Amino acid sequence: MSRQRKVRIAFAALTLCLLWFSLPRAAEIDGDAKARKGTVRCGGSNTLRLGGTEIQYATYNLRNFNAAIPITVEQLTVYGATGQVLFDSATSGLPQFPNSTLGPLDNVLVPNQSADIATTNFLPFLPDHQRPIQLEIVWSAPERALLLEVVLIRIARQRDPLTGQELQERSRHTAACRTIGVEK
């Protein structure tokens, strides 16, 4: 083989290597992102409408998709429409979640565990100037873990204004909450 041919083959190989390493690689997809700490934000509301005949509220579903790593809910804070703090678990403790997976005495989601809570479980009905709200959840894990997933479910239900009993559901909307910060 001629020297010139060897140089061309070496040059071609070098060019292919450079191209290969310069190509963009697939990034971690949402479900595979990992961190030791994170902050999640969600929207929501907790109000009476239409003369008390309708209630609108939010339910938050927290999921630990890790098979072997627990996630600790460090703080849960609710902000009103103008940024005022309406609820802060750092001062009042974590509210009791209806399925008893989280509460004042237990802030750890064990592997594969889910917990959900409605704003009606820990917030009063809010006047117009305090809504909509934002929920912020700060969490941590003992090692890099799949991110805490939080889903917002907005619900509107018919309500008996005399008894306060919730009646027929009028609407429902589900939205993913946003991870706004992580510490890897």
Image: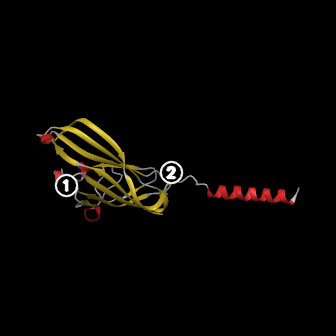
Residue 54's disc is none
Q: What color scheme is it?
A: secondary structure
**In this image, 177 relative to 147: left or right?**
left
Q: Residue at image x 19%, y 54%?
A: 130
The mark that comes first in sequence, 2 or 1, is: 2
Which residue is labeled 1 in the image?
A: 130
Residue 118, position in %: x, y?
28, 48
Q: Secondary structure at mark 2?
A: loop
Residue type at mark 2 is Ile
The span from disc 2 to disc 1 (Cα, nearest Å) is 36 Å
Residue 29, position in %: x, y?
51, 51
Residue 100, position in %: x, y?
33, 51
Q: Residue at image x 67%, y 59%?
A: 18
Residue 125, position in %: x, y?
18, 50
Q: Secondary structure at mark 1?
A: helix
Q: Residue at image x 84%, y 59%?
A: 4
Q: Is residue 164 above or below residue 2?
A: above
Residue 29's disc is 2
Q: Quadrant of residue 92?
A: bottom left
Residue type at mark 1 is Gln
